[in-house]
Amino acid sequence: MSQKQLIISRTATALCGLLGVLTLLPMVPANSWWVRMWDFPRPQIFSVALILFPVVLFIKFSRKAVKIGMAAVLLAVLVAQAWKVVPFTPLNSRQVQSTDRLKSDRNVTMLCSNVLMSNEDSSKLAGQIEALKPSLVLLTECDERWLKELKPVTDSYPYKVEKPISNTYGMALYSQFELVEPEIKFLLEDDIPSIHTKLVLPSQEMVKLYCLHPRPPAPQESDSTAQRDAELILVAKETGKLDMPVIVMGDLNDVAWSPTTALFQSRSGLLDPRVGRGLYSTFHAKIPFLRFPLDHVFHSSHFRLAQLEVRPDIGSDHFPILINLSLEDSAPLFQPTPTPTPGTEERTEKTIKEGFQEERREELGED
């Protein structure tokens, strides 16, 4: 082999090994951020493996067994990553049925946007709110400045819940529909709020709404996913007991195909409208190749989907997401509700316990 061929073969071997390791890491039963973060870039890992596979077949190696081994590893990577991501593409059947009913007294249109607290241009989001006139607007990562600058458009919403915080976990909900018993709760951490309320549709039917923004798994935020996971599963446990229409929305700092999201759906019985439609990636707005679906709307089987779209850039690192749900009597008959699988209850309690344990460890560490 020439020196050039040797360099190419060794580079391909290293890349193949790296992709194999990054595919195996999320299978490790650990909450460390450097393990769980590899749940996120599955489409990217799949894409790199897909490009590398024909390259491995084409280039020369010192031994044929090396080529065969690398091809086998890449094939395993492709299968493992596709297994997780393909359900969120049109290749899979839809979990939520579509409806043509865009407007009625049983429709609710929601705009969810992580504004990026340091983003100094509020005009783009204000323009979208004014143009779309959604029933609900949920803002995450908002501080006092953001609420003040958006006041000209949010003043038209008669019902609101605001909790601006300068730690990037501020939250605000604006509604054209009556909010009943709205609460700001701190489920796990005393600086991470969530909004829990009942929503009265124009049809006078009641919907339970949860707005969340848990802490992400990142070294500058949290060394563990335990608290994020526990917050999501605490809500899943509560919604699983409700006998009424439910919506959970927000920047959940988790991807649609993660084990936590699977447990969330299994325990809550809520549906994901992206299944069978697309990824609808909202983050990172500035890095096209590194985009993941972090902003979510889950709902009970009482609703069909009228509209779902990722909205244009507003200067944040997240794109806003718009969803229109239609409450329809026949929907539960045709949309199977996710049900708990064996071990769901044990995993639920374990996840919640680990979250509170991690929170206590952090508190003791600060003291």
Image (cartoon, rainbow, N blue to C red):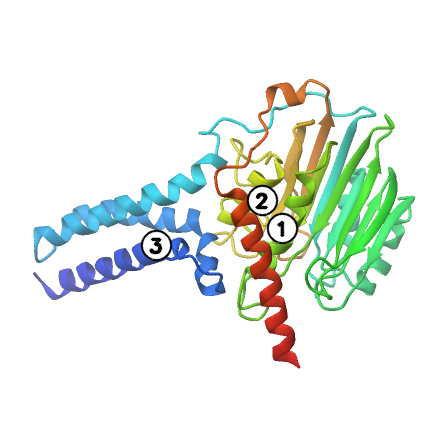
Q: Please name the residue that numbered disc 3 is placed on.
A: 24
Q: Please name the residue that numbered disc 1 is placed on.
A: 232
Is residue 192 positioned above or below 99 on the image? below
First in sequence: mark 1 or mark 2? 1
How many other residues sit within 10 Å of disc 3, few (<14), some (14-19) or many (≥20)?
some
Is residue 302 positioned above or below 228 on the image? above
Residue 200 position, x and y percent, is 85, 34
Q: Mark 2: which secondary structure?
A: helix
Q: Mark 3: which secondary structure?
A: helix
Q: Please name the residue that numbered disc 2 is placed on.
A: 264
How many other residues sit within 10 Å of disc 2, few (<14), some (14-19) or many (≥20)?
many
Residue 98 position, x and y percent, is 62, 24
> Of circles 1 and 3, which is in front?
1
- The residue closer to the viewer here, 352 or 259, is 352
Residue under the image location 9 percent in, 63 percent down: 2
- The residue closer to the viewer here, 312 or 145, is 145
How many other residues sit within 10 Å of disc 1, few (<14), some (14-19) or many (≥20)?
many
Residue under the image location 18 percent in, 64 percent down: 7
Q: Quadrant of the N terminus?
A: bottom left
First in sequence: mark 1 or mark 3? 3
| Left-right relation of 58 to 141 | left
**The quarter of the displayed image where residue 311 is located:** top right
Residue under the image location 67 percent in, 47 percent down: 235
